Image: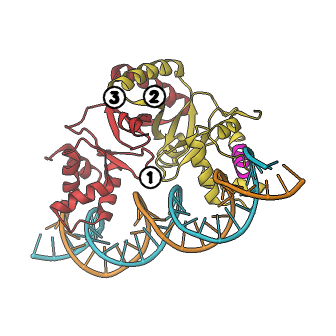
Chain colours: A yellow, B red, C orange, D cyan
DNA sequence: ATTCTTATTGAAAATGGTTTTCATTATCAA
DNA sequence: TTGATAATGAAAACCATTTTCAATAAGAAT
């Protein structure tokens, strides 16, 4: 079996490799932003105008189920997606969200300490609550410099 | 000026104290759950059947703007709300979310260590990115024991 | 290569949480 | 008590996401 890791992942779960799926992966591989389904759709139709928004939603949903992308909700009323193992992105990172303009900054400050604590916490929680933990998110909410000046 | 802290908060921001706002606060004060707007609406009309769902949304939005409630998005397609300083709740806590049944557990394990790290991180981030940070969230996502058995 | 099974797709319609509109009502300062 | 205006409720609008369904395409079997 050859091809990139996400392709293996698809086949392992019994899914097929299709053109829309390739295109969506490529879009996510080539950005360091947090794209919404619509962002991805608008980009995708540049490559293949026949792709439907429905397919974008379905693909992102599938990808997040098999761990190829991670879905985020920063409270804007729309989901945003990041490719797992994106070569353009910091490896383990978290988010700083402006509650005003919704801009998002990835940060990695104190990640080592953070990971140590999270691993410990994760272990404690999974035993205490019999939870099988997959991942965690940390978000800081505040106001960015631009928005502070304007107000 | 007398009355509870959230009432002061309302007046400080120039808002009025109304019956729907009282009722919604009382609902939030008397639960340790994470209620959705609809949950609150259903409870509110027991006290006053004329309250509209619109008002519930508006009130929750107002309250989260002035810091009386905190709005959460656990990725279910609906927001959930917690009263700030809820006497029935653990003070500083975070969430453990079942990706399957969406049940939510509040946890406080290692909060002291966590707060220490978060304060340090917050300080670093606000300087580095000129962000004015208001609060942070930590979510663990996984599968609860019930859901693991069923699958 | 060709056929066959069935996963996948795209378009349109439906869904469902949340917002907006607007005329009416209620709060509270004067 | 009154006046200014903040707040409300009902209905309609909004908008991200899902569902439906008939057509298409991927890849296994032949």
Subunit ID for the residue under disc 3: A
The residue to which callout 2 is attached is B122
Q: Are marks 3 and 1 on the same chain?
A: no
Task: From this view, report whether residue A46 is shown above or below residue A107.
Answer: below
Subunit ID for the residue under disc 2: B
Marks 1/2: CA–CA distance: 29 Å
The residue to which callout 3 is attached is A129
Q: Nearer the viewer, residue B131 or A12?
A: A12
Q: Nearer the viewer, residue A133 or A109?
A: A133
- What residue do we see at 35% from left, 37% from top? B146
Q: Where is residue B6 shown, x and y percent of the image?
A: 23, 46
Tag count: 3
The residue to which callout 1 is attached is B77
Q: Are marks 3 and 2 on the same chain?
A: no
Q: Nearer the viewer, residue A5 or B24?
A: A5
Q: Is residue B19 left or right of residue D17?
A: left
């Amino acid at each position: 079996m050859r091809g990139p890791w996400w392709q293996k992942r698809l086949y392992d779960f019994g899914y097929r490799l299709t053109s829309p799926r390739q295109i969506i992966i490529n879009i996510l591989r080539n950005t360091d932003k947090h794209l919404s389904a619509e962002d991805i759709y608008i980009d995708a139709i540049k490559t293949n105008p026949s792709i439907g928004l429905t397919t974008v939603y379905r693909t992102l949903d599938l990808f997040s189920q098999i761990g190829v992308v991670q879905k985020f909700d920063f409270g804007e009323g729309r989901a945003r997606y990041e490719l797992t193992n994106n070569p353009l992105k910091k490896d383990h990172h978290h988010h700083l969200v402006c509650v005003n303009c919704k801009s998002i900054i990835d940060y990695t400050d104190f990640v080592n300490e953070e990971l140590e604590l999270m691993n410990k916490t994760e272990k404690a929680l999974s035993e205490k609550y019999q939870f099988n933990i997959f991942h965690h998110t940390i978000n800081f909410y505040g106001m960015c410099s631009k928005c502070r000046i304007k107000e």
